[in-house]
Amino acid sequence: MQNEARQPGQGTREDDQENGARLMLDIPSSRERPASQPEPEGKLSGEPLRESALTGIFEISKILTAPCRLEVTLANVVGLLQSFVQMRHGIVSLFDEDGMPDITVGAGWSEGSDERYRMRLPRKAIDQIIATDRPLVVENVAAEPVFSAADREVLGASDDMPVSFIGVPIRIDLKVVGTLTVDRIRDDRSSLRLEYDARLLAMIANLVGQTVKLHRLFACDRERLMAEKDRLQKQVLELRQPARERKKLHAHGIIGDSPALRGLLEKIAVVARSNSTVLLRGESGTGKELVAKAIHESSSRARRPFVKLNCAALPETVLESELFGHEKGAFTGAFSSRKGRFELADKGTLFLDEIGEISASFQAKLLRVLQEQEFERVGSNQTVKVDVRVIAATNKNLEEAVARSEFRADLYYRISVVPLLLPPLRERRSDIPLLAREFLRNFNNENGRTLTLEASAIDVLMNCGFPGNVRELENCIERTATLCAGSSIVRSDFACCHGQCLSAMLWKGTSDERPDQPAPMPSVPAKSTIPLPQPSQPTQPIQSVGGELASLGPPGTVLVSGARIADRERVIAAMERSGWVQAKAARLLGLTPRQIGYALRKYGIEIKRF
């Protein structure tokens, strides 16, 4: 009756009924008992072995389907194994996506005891099981080279105490995600059942793998639902708060309360709720990076990475490596593999500043990534799939660039899904005092000073054009505060009041419209008008051309919107007499270089180049 499972006439029926599963749990193979030797007296019959195995698997399946923490479930599985598998220690070890230990449990597991069980694992043997994706069955670990001296010490194996070891991989689909291992003191009975127990543990490891897969899927779903819940709660709180408080909550670093800025903040709140590609348009210094970060922090990707890259700061070859990454040896100096910005920003947001400066050849590569959300690293043919929201920014007129074939039209349509126009500082003058005080407060904190802004200083700032926008205002405040000798900043502390404003000299030759300026530059308030010096005044701009000044700029002529302005012919005549040098023409008319620039743009006078 001991070999009842192998009797003729019954094998075919068992194959049909049990699909081979029970035959795997049959009595030990001939490898364990040579045919020349009689059957050991203490050997168990096949049927009791199968009954014990089926009962154990049934009980384990009930444990795996119980609603418990994964660690508790696995610990209960190991505890139950001890009742029908001869073992001294049993350990289930799981690894995360990067191959690092995630969960390590055994019988009697408790919170915080993972490290204790992890110390009992023979590292070299575990590494072999994971690398080969095959079970490891060893009758005496002391005689096997796969176990190092440290591993043998961990298992307590010695010449006087032989220890057997069984380890099987735990898989999710085709990927090894952990191991199930047992060790026991070797004796005659345990040696006979060694391979039998290995096949049994392989079945249990398969059940454990399915359970781990379900737990991880549930964890991902729970994380997604919690994120969705947080997003909905944030929207509910946003609707309950006043509009101004809502904007401040989602726009950290953006300061101001002007109508133009409030309109921008409202658009940011709407755009942040989607995953659409955004194109930020505006002059240099308007805060495009701050707006991009505000969109990211207000979106559902706020907990994911925000990665930024200035496309104009790198040559094309370096830019490709920075965005897509590279493999080891892809080019000279590539000593190791490296992830690109797209991979680093996976599930998050990638901010591409100065996107209008990239070359035509690189535009085609970028277009494919934006369309397919996939790419290959430099030096690799393996496709990497990512989920990235792209926010691009430029101060270049892309429409003109497309018309001149300098920028691909298909890439333009891909990045300009939701264009946002950032207002220049001259369109939000009411924000200047708030910005100036914030910049001065930052300066005081960094330098240990207590400077304040007087009303006269605010008047100077309100009357400035700030073609460099917020960045120029910040520099102006820092420069003036650094050179200020008193306890407060007054009108006379500003360089522009002494004709020493370097920014004005920089912009004095600008005669063309700024590329992204959506409308003509608004008028400077009347109080900022600089009156022409009267002919009778002793301080004329240039004494040698006093007669010309009298003929070109009669008393009372002012070159500022809202006042009378010299006619087109008078401006042209001044430019011709000065050799089309704006600074000289401005002195002839008794104006500033910036004012003559305004006049040239207003009348559409083209500058002649010599």
Image: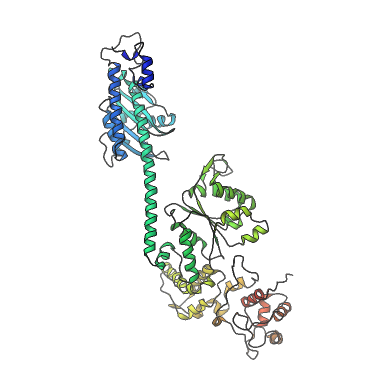
Residue found 40% across the figure and 73% down from its top: 450
Looking at the image, the residue that sits furthest to the bottom is 536
Camera-side residue of 95 and 338 = 95
Residue 148, relative to residue 242: is it above or below?
above
Camera-side residue of 101 and 421 = 421
540 relative position to 268: left or right: right
**Residue 372 location (% of width, % of height):** 55, 46
Q: What is the tally of numbered marks visible in this picture?
A: 0
**Residue 574 location (% of width, % of height):** 71, 80
Residue found 49% across the figure and 61% down from its top: 291
Q: What is the quadrant of residue 115 in the picture?
A: top left
Q: What is the quadrant of residue 244 in the picture?
A: bottom left
Q: What is the quadrant of residue 402 in the picture?
A: bottom right
Q: How is the image coloured?
A: rainbow
583 relative position to 342: left or right: right
Q: Specify whether residue 156 is in view.
A: no
Q: Quadrant of the C terminus?
A: bottom right
Camera-side residue of 28 and 480 = 28
**Residue 128 location (% of width, % of height):** 41, 29
Q: Quadrant of the N terminus?
A: top left
Residue 100, relative to residue 181: is it above or below?
below
Residue 327, relative to residue 487: is it above or below?
above
Q: Specify whether residue 413 is in view.
A: yes
**Residue 3 location (% of width, % of height):** 31, 12
